[in-house]
Image: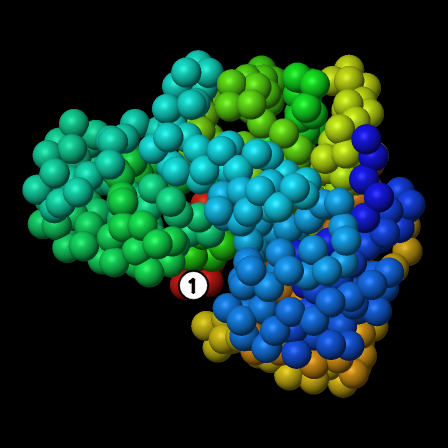
Amino acid sequence: MSLRSVLVANRGEIALRVVRACRELGIRSVAVYSDADASAAHVRHADDAVHIGKSSASKSYLNADAVLEAARSAGVDAVHPGYGFLSERPSFAAAVEEAGLTFVGPPSSVIATMGDKAAARAVARSADVPVVPGSDEVSSADDAVAAAEEVGYPVLVKASAGGGGRGIRPAASADELRTVVVEAQREASSAFGSGAVYLERALQGPKHVEVQVLADTHGGVVHCFERECSLQRRRQKILEEAPAPGLSSELRSALCDAAVRLSAQVGYVGAGTVEFLVEGEEFFFIEMNTRIQVEHPITEWITGLDLVAEQLRIAGGEPLSVAQDDIVRRGAAIEFRVNAEDPDQDFLPSPGEVTGLELPGGPGVRVDTALMAGDVVPPFYDSLVAKLAVWALTREQALARGRRALAEYRVEGLPTTIGLHRRLLDEPAVVDGTYDITTLETWLAGG
């Protein structure tokens, strides 16, 4: 059964991306929008649109009841959550299922399992996928200190229900751990509705590598190779590339095989990403993102696949359109996240009107954005306004193409991270691909 109509429960570039995929597949798309997004691109390009609330995310895009009512009133078959907002909330996926609609993503039970870091680690172990040495959930400072004696310092205190880098605190000693456990529990409770935390050994300068997977409802699971995501600030990704530089062929194969095993073990369905920390020739599972990723364009560049179209076909009950042997990696791709932030002011968000806009183009250049000159970047949502992705036959050529595209990219009226990316591409560790998860923050600090 193919899908006939889909409600896109998101905004901005990812909502527009889903609308475009629906159009190509002959699927009716229905956008949702807040007061702030009444004239937004995803609303203009969708076949229909439903107003769901005020500008605040909590009163619109995070209001599950309003989104479900919009789905019912629009008479859709399915709901695509995009990324962020409600995309990884098992309660929302369950509500969609209970409403008799198709959730474009894995079953709610899988989201719940993989969204609980302790449960996800247990799934990884059962699939013979290595995990970072760590503990079960700890409920008090005393429990944490006792667990750290087994895990070994330094440790990270991590939220069991966490994501996006929140609810994580480092500790190098028992005294420090007693303090940060309480802080992490408080932040986790506020951000995720659960104060449960666990310990994980803090690896020293690892690389953050993730593997894209696709799985259908017929037992098919494939990987679409890996992405390098180590350039992060406060655990938020800034730049990603595919394939990951510097990996041996043996390590690359082991990572991809592990991601497939884990996905099969948990009964995954749809597009997902299995994330690892890599240290030398060792790798460790850290989490699974049960949704489409911000950085999916670079995987599409190197494989030729349309990952969002695959999501929609899978949700409609179709088998995967490709077998593992059909997925061939070609060339190198880099994605630059363009945020409405001022890097010179500690990345202060910079909402406001875009008074001028010139997008880069030419061979091997893709810009995913919903922004146009004259649009206003509202202060209510994430600061990501565009993704510039470039592709070339070699990594060296992709870097050169990135420099050229960034030089052409012009946004007037508000600060963005475009200038930061221009500078990054001249940094030796970025040029030679030896950077790790500490590189960007060290560089920003002047180290």
Q: Amino acid at mark 1?
A: Gly
- Residue 124 versus residue 337: which sits nearer the camera? 124
Report x, y in % for residue 247.
58, 26
- Residue 61 versus residue 214: which sits nearer the camera? 61
Judge whether residue 415 can be spotted in this image. Answer: no
Residue at 72% x, 60% y: name it: 73
Tell me if 196 is positioned left or right of 28 in this view: left
Label 1 crowd (10 A; few <14 / some 14-19 / many >=20): few
Q: Looking at the figure, which quarter contains the N terminus? A: top right
Report x, y in % for residue 231.
53, 49
Q: Is residue 358 above or below residue 17?
A: below
- Residue 248 versus residue 4: which sits nearer the camera? 4
Return the residue at label 1. 446
Residue at 37% x, 24% y: name it: 122
Q: Quadrant of residue 210?
A: top right
Residue at 19% x, 32% y: name it: 152
Q: Looking at the figure, which quarter contains the C terminus? A: bottom left
Report x, y in % for residue 29.
81, 54
Tell me if 126 is positioned left or right of 365 in this view: left
How many numbered marks appear?
Answer: 1
Report x, y in % for residue 354.
73, 81
Judge whether residue 186 can be spotted in this image. Answer: yes
Tell me if 407 is positioned left or right of 262 in this view: right
Q: Quadrant of residue 33?
A: bottom right
For label 1, the SS is: loop
